[in-house]
Structure formats: structure tokens, C-alpha cells
Amino acid sequence: MSQVLIVGAGRLGKGFLGETFFNAGWKIGFLDNDPRVTEELQRTGTFTVKVHSADDIINNTISGYNVFDCDDNHSCMDFFLNTDVVCLPLYPSDFEEAASYLAPCFEEQMKKNPTKKMTLICLTNKNHIIEKIKGYFLNNLSSEAAKAWFKENVAFRDSIVRRSTDAPTNYSTDLVTTAVASLLIQSPVYNPIDDVQWLELRDNIEMLKDIKVFTINGPHAATAYMGYLRGMKTIPEASADPIVGNKVNEIHDLIVKAVMEEYPITREELKDLEYLPKAKNEIPDSIRRVAYDPIRKLGKQDRLIGTALLCQKHGIDFEPLAYAIACAFSYDDPSDLNAVKLQKEIQENGLASTVTKVTGLPQDHPIAATILRFSNNLKQELNV
Ligand SMILES: NC(=O)C1=CN([C@@H]2O[C@H](COP(=O)(O)OP(=O)(O)OC[C@H]3O[C@@H](n4cnc5c(N)ncnc54)[C@H](O)[C@@H]3O)[C@@H](O)[C@H]2O)C=CC1
Ligand SMILES: O=P(O)(O)OC[C@H]1O[C@](O)(CO)[C@@H](O)[C@@H]1O
């Protein structure tokens, strides 16, 4: 039986990977450093995922999995040694710690099964960080021999996530997910995964990931920040709102135009990547999850500033995006640590300086200047 270790048993770990590998009959292990996650998975012994596909909604109950804490004695070791695929659905800031924890497992694998091949798949929305993450793993290996073994025997791959999976918390055992498009994984991999639905190998993941993050996550984040300002709680609610909906449609079309100018991709290829079939009864995805961590989302290469810069580069109107960005700078959900940090920064140092610090754009940059202009009159545009 093939075996997968899922490092990060939060929303995507359980609601997408857990559910998907379970359906394919793989042996599943979850490793998480939050004791609330591991305790809850152990206590319940099962978790449920409401899966919205294009024409059906099914409730799936997942059971028979193994659960491991990130304990000092590496209780996941025996499981790890029999593992074929390691999936890491983690936020970008969590990889350094995960690499440090997993390094001894790879060293042991090299000693016990030197010819074994493994595949490691990173699942984030952040592009161009895969070499840095690989560096975390290599730096934690203790010898040149181990580094050479790792490079030779572990297929280290990035991926593109094309689904939303939500739950009230990372430790919830009741999840909801959309299943309308596959996870795209950089090919080749070292272990067969063709028996697992919703996993698909592709070349050129780095370019495709920019396009996906820009065309899907850009408008999605804009929906969240504008919806929040309108007092809404869910993405479907915000999308159905005519004021937010129209602004997001405009933003989407401008981004698509800019992407078509920038990348060697045909409209058909783009459609295949960014057009996700509608799931039956859209999931009540929370604005909180999609807006989560505005500091990361306002980074220079990320979904909002990255797309505004692309529009500017190609002479395409970036004002609607700058408006959504201004809304993101006003995002103040008290339960989002980085939203709180952002607001504190604005209060202490002013908006202009914060825009520059977070986005990397100088204050006189036309996009920064437009963000500041809109910020003076944010609520009026949205009729609030
Ligand atoms: N939920 C979704 O629909 C999507 C999520 N993503 C990406 O997937 C990644 C995970 O997202 P979610 O599952 O939603 O987050 P989450 O917060 O629900 O789950 C992340 C889990 O990783 C665990 N974790 C953190 N550091 C760890 C470590 N060093 N070792 C072991 N476990 C660790 C946390 O305790 C948490 O349970 C993020 O990069 C996100 O951007 C991408 C697209 C869709
Ligand atoms: O996981 P992040 O990067 O914080 O952002 C959430 C985004 O990821 C997705 O879940 C899938 O890409 C989108 O639904 C949402 O826009």
C-alpha cells in the first residue's frame, strides 16, 4: 500500500489531501506541531469533509489515519521510513521549522534504505520560494553525503492549489472543500501518484503558478477585502453583492489582459488554468481565510501588488486594483495577527510609510500614490 505523510494537518491537510489520499486507499499519516490539531484528530478518530464537486455534494468520513506530534523523539520516524510521498500544506513562514524537524527523518532514511526514492510536495500560494525551502532542508542535513543523497533521492516539488478548503479553525474535524480542479504538481515525481484523483503532473509550474495566483487569488483577495469593508463574512455573500461583484469582475478582466501580455500563454491555456468549474452550491468560504495575513498578500510579487505592477507595465488601468489594495490596508480583523500588526504600523508610522514598507513601492510610485489617494475616501466608493 502506498503511503503519504501530511505535514500540517490543518484545513488543506485534512480537507483536501487527507480526503483525497483516503479515497485512493493510501495509508495516511498526519504530523502537526499544534497539539490542538493532533489531540482532536486522535480524540475523534475520524474527520468529516463536505466535498462540493461540480455536480454533487458528498459527506465523506475519513478514518484509519496515523497522527504524530512534532515530539523530540520523532515518533513519526517508523511511519516516515515507509513513506513514499511527503506533502507539506503549510504557510510559507512554517517551512524552516518543518525542515529542521524532518531532517533527521531523511538522514535515517538514507541510512536504513539508501536506494529509496521519495517525493516531497510543497503546497502554498507563494511562488519563487521553492529553492529557498529546499535550502532549509539541505542546511539541516548534517553531512555532505546526506545532502547528496537528498538531492538524488527526493523529488522536491512545488505545486499549484486550485481549490478552497475551509473550517472554523485549523484543528476542526468538520471541513468543507471544493473539488473541481486538480492540484498541479511539477513533473517528474519519483513515486507513482496516478491512482490519486485530483493530482496532476505538469511542466513549467513556476510560470503557471504566477498566472494562477494573479488571476485567481488576485480577484479573490480583492473580494475579501472589499467584502470585509461592506461588513460581510463570507466570499459568496461578497461576490453576490453588486458593488463588490462589479469591481471584482473589472479587476479580473484587467488582470487577465495583463497576464496575456506578459506570459507566453494562449487564451485556451489560460482558461484551463484559471477557469474553475462552479462547484454545486458554492462553499461558504470565510472572508477571514481569504483575507488572512494581509502583510503577505500585499507583498511585491503577490496577488495584489504583483498584478497592479503587471498592469502598469503593460499600460493597463491599475486603478481598480489600487482601490482593492487600499481596502486591504484598512483590513483590521482583530483575530488576524498580521492585520493587527499592519494597523499598528499604520497608526505609529502613517499609511504612506507603511505602504512603502509592506509593498516595497516608493511613496512617489504611481501605484503607491493611487493607493494613498483612494485611502482618503475608501468607504464612499463602496457605499458604506
Ligand atoms: N485552505 C485552502 O483552501 C488553501 C490553502 N492554501 C495554502 O496551503 C497552506 C496551508 O493552508 P491551510 O491548510 O488553510 O492552513 P491551516 O492553518 O488550516 O493549516 C496549517 C497547519 O500547519 C501546521 N503547522 C505549522 N507549522 C508546522 C510545522 N512546522 N510542522 C507541522 N505542522 C505545522 C499548523 O499547526 C496548521 O495545523 C498555506 O500555504 C495556504 O496558503 C492554498 C490554497 C488553498
Ligand atoms: O491561502 P492564502 O494564500 O492565505 O490565500 C487564500 C487563497 O487560497 C485559496 O484558498 C486557493 O488558492 C483561495 O481560495 C484563496 O484566495
Image (cartoon, helix red, strand yellow):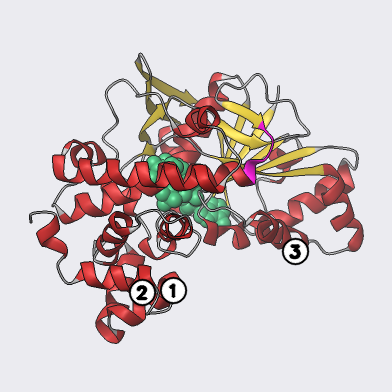
Q: Which residue is drawn at 43% across and 53% down?
A: 303
Residue receiving disc 1:
361
Query: In the displayed structure, does residue 226 sit left or right of residue 318?
Result: left
In the image, which residues are magenta? 202-206
Instruction: Determine which of the numbered discs, if any, sits on residue 140 in the image.
Output: 3
Whether residue 281 is in magenta: the answer is no
Q: Residue at x 50, y 54 (%)?
A: 91
Query: In the displayed structure, does residue 31 sit left or right of residue 19?
Result: right
Tell me which amino acid carries mark 3: Asn
Tell me which amino acid carries mark 1: Leu
Q: How many numbered discs?
A: 3
Q: How far apart are marks 2 and 3 (CA)?
A: 35 Å
Number of residues whose C-alpha sits closer than 10 Å to that of mark 2, classed few (under 14), some (14–19) or many (20 or more): many
Q: How far apart are marks 2 and 1 (CA)?
A: 7 Å
Looking at the picture, how far across and down is residue 102, in whole percent?
A: 69, 54
Of residues 323 and 209, the one drawn nearer to the viewer in this rendering: 323
Number of residues whose C-alpha sits closer than 10 Å to that of mark 3, classed few (under 14), some (14–19) or many (20 or more): some
* SS under mark 2: helix
Residue receiving disc 2:
355
Number of residues whose C-alpha sits closer than 10 Å to that of mark 1, classed few (under 14), some (14–19) or many (20 or more): some
Looking at the picture, how far across and down is residue 187, in whole percent?
A: 72, 35
Name the N-terminal-most of marks 2 and 3.
3
* SS under mark 1: loop
Residue at the far front in the pictured view = 315
Do the residues under discs 2 and 1 have CB atoms within 8 angstroms? yes
